[in-house]
Image (spheres, grey):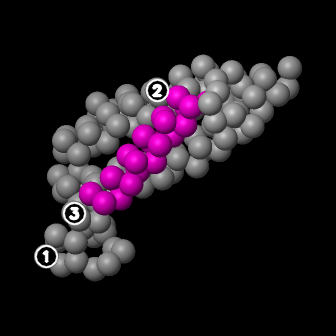
């Protein structure tokens, strides 16, 4: 199984590494504040604050991670074609990287912001794999 899904596994590693980096960036940004309280992000902060943006980037990734990883693991266990699993994992991984970069770089309240498109791309990759998995196990 490891050989068949090796590309998908490398993509999962990239996703997990991305979340780890986001966690470190958010921790460092949070601790550099003058009035730092562990575990609390000031609710008065908004997109103009890098502390807010780094925190939201991490939380957004964590909100999406469980569904994507769960879908990938079940798809692998069910024997969904490795190319489908790898393709959707890599689209998701790259979309999350671009989303992270845009969230860090752009302080905007505009909706949709450029990062929103990459959030949607990541969600669509997950949906495609969910549908493929459903089709695979139900039909």
Given residues 76 and 65, the one toward you in this image is: 76
Q: Earlier in the sequence, mark 1 or mark 2?
A: 1
Left or right of 80? Residue 106 is: left
Location of residue 104 with respect to 80 vertically, above or below: below
Q: How far apart in space, not on screen, are marks 2 and 3 (Cα)? A: 28 Å
Given residues 13 and 26, the one toward you in this image is: 13
Rendering quarter of residue 100? top left
Instruction: Bin the neighbour count of mark 2 within 10 Å (Cα to Cα): few under 14, some 14-19, many 20 and up.
Output: some
Location of residue 47 with respect to 137 vertically, above or below: below
Location of residue 75 with respect to 135 vertically, above or below: below
Asked whether residue 45 is drawn in magenta, I would say: no
Rendering quarter of residue 45? bottom left
Q: How far apart in space, not on screen, are marks 1 and 3 (Cα)? A: 11 Å
Secondary structure mostly taken by the magenta-highlighted segment of the chain: helix
Q: Identify the residue at image location x=58%, y=40%.
A: 68
How many marks can you see? Answer: 3
Left or right of 54? Residue 16 is: right
Span highlighted in magenta in the image: 5-25
**Viewer-side label of 1, 2:** 2
Q: Quadrant of the C terminus?
A: top right
Q: Quadrant of the N terminus?
A: top right
- Where is mark 1, residue-wise? 34
- Where is mark 2, residue-wise? 91
* Contact between labelled residues 3 and 2, with CB atoms less than 8 Å apart: no
Instruction: Bin the neighbour count of mark 1 within 10 Å (Cα to Cα): few under 14, some 14-19, many 20 and up.
Output: few
User: Which type of secondary structure does the marked residue at label 3 adopt?
Assistant: helix
Instruction: Bin the neighbour count of mark 3 within 10 Å (Cα to Cα): few under 14, some 14-19, many 20 and up.
Output: some
User: Which type of secondary structure does the marked residue at label 2 adopt?
Assistant: helix
- Where is mark 3, residue-wise? 29
Q: Residue furthest front?
A: 3
Residue 82 visible within the image? yes
Residue 76 % position (x, y): 69, 34
């Amino acid at each position: 199984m490891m050989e068949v899904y090796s590309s998908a596994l490398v993509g999962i590693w990239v996703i997990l590494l991305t979340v780890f980096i986001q966690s470190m960036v958010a921790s460092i940004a949070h601790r550099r504040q003058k009035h730092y309280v562990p575990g609390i992000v000031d609710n008065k902060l908004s997109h103009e604050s890098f502390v807010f943006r780094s925190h939201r980037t991490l939380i957004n990734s964590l909100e999406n991670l469980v569904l994507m990883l769960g879908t990938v693991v079940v798809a692998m266990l069910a024997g969904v074609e490795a190319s489908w699993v790898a393709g959707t994992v890599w689209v998701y991984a790259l979309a999350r990287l671009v989303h992270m970069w845009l969230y860090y770089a752009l302080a905007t309240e505009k909706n949709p912001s450029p990062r929103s498109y990459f959030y949607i791309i990541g969600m669509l990759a997950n949906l495609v794999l969910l549908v493929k998995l459903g089709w695979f196990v139900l039909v």
